[in-house]
Amino acid sequence: MTLDPRTYNDFVVPRISFLLVIILTLLLLTSIDSQAAPIKPPIEVKVVVVAMYESGALSGDNPGELQLWVERLKLNQAFPFELGEYELRMNNQDVLGIVLGGGIANATASIMALGLDPRFDLTNAYWLIAGIAGADPADMSLGSAAWARWVIDGDLLYEIDGREIPGDWKYGFVPLGGRRPADKPEDIYTGWTVNTIAFELNQSLVEWAFQLTKDTHIPDGEGIAEYRQLYKGYPKATLPPFVTLGETLSASTYWHGELMNRWANDWIKLYSHREGRKTEMNFMTSNMEDSGTLTGLHRLARKKLVNPDRILVLRTASNYTMPPPGKDAAWSTTAPYPDGGYPAKNAAFLVGNVVVQELLTHWEKYKAKTP
């Protein structure tokens, strides 16, 4: 078919010219925009304070786990964070605060979202996971703080109903791949498992943080002091608040009771000894997020977006994991936290901030080398 020249000149040429004008205009606008608003380099973060929940706003009301940090460290710069539960907060000393949301799923998702956020450079950052927890009355008192050397997951297991537990079993929890409750570390070597059950933290860093904070004064509270006296026969449970070293068990299930507490102690020993270590590890605190947080951080470390040797977990006792003598588990599971849990929230800031201030004061030293 032959195209009439008049048709070509009247119809095709004007349209080609119009398209060229649009393309050139778009290129010009893009060039002007790139010159007017250059891409900002990511903010180098020094410390990430990781909290799990808030009661409402991030300031000015009943505090959750991040509010005291926001108000006292002036984390006043807000960053929208659509993939998280709350906006991010930062101060002019490059301390970044995040609220993960309760439970392992929220923790994992929020940490991955932050780690992949191009606005921040987290490669040299230290991570301080600081929040309240249930505490084993054999080891801690209300308001006390424990630096964890291990984070162990308590959800990934076999479970049978308590009414169907065989008579020679202590409880109805069995390691994945096992056939009965495991009493010895070697019992779980032959079973199948996943790699997000046991996380060993940098022992040198944890010991450094403990030595730095072990003499920190933690204010007592009238409510927690009175409640502690219910735990007759548990000497450490009745002490004023103190700082210690102790492992944490992470489970989205809010478990409670003397028999569950026995399982938690066994589970920590079981999985912290799995690699053949002989150091005695001890369950002290229960939480609902930390194995998810550690999962996210270790995934990000695969791409060298974070340093897994710069993670600290500080859990403070807002309640006990089992009832006092004379009370049953159903009563204490839902009993209000004495003093509203405030002494534990305050302890998380007071103890954790000692570490934060040390890192900030000597940043060039700690940026180059992990304690």
Image (tube, rainbow, N blue to C red):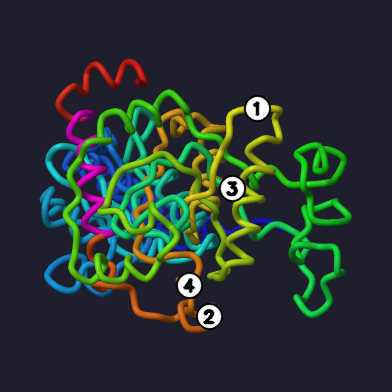
Using residue 18 as the reference point, say whether residue 295 is left or right of it. right
Q: Which mark is residue 328?
A: 2
Q: Determine the residue positioned at 66% across, 50% down.
A: 266
Label 3 CA crowd tier, 10 Å (few <14, some 14–19, many 20+): many
Q: Quadrant of residue 335?
A: bottom left
Q: Determine the residue positioned at 75% across, 76% down.
A: 162
Q: Determine the residue positioned at 50% across, 64% down.
A: 103
Name the spot of residue 306 as percent of width and height, x first. 44, 33
Foreground: 19 or 106? 106
Residue under pointer 4:
325
Determine the CA span between mark 2 and mark 1: 36 Å
Determine the CA span between mark 4 and mark 2: 8 Å
Q: Determine the residue positioned at 20% across, 37% down.
A: 354
Which amino acid does the dot numbered 4 rest on? Pro
Q: Which residues are magenta?
A: 344-359
Using residue 133 as the reference point, say whether residue 267 is left or right of it. right
Determine the CA span between mark 1 and mark 3: 15 Å
Foreground: 8 or 19? 19
Give the label, 4 or 3, closer to the camera.
4
Determine the CA span between mark 4 and mark 3: 28 Å
Q: Secondary structure at mark 4?
A: loop
Which amino acid does the dot numbered 2 rest on? Asp
Residue under pointer 1:
277
Position of residue 8 relative to residue 63, above or below, is: above
Which amino acid does the dot numbered 1 rest on? Arg
Quadrant position of the N terminus in the picture: bottom right
Foreground: 130 or 143? 143
Residue under pointer 3:
152
Which amino acid does the dot numbered 3 rest on? Ile
Position of residue 110 relative to residue 102, above or below, is: above
Q: Earlier in the sequence, mark 2 or mark 1?
A: 1
Name the spot of residue 3 as percent of width and height, x first. 62, 57
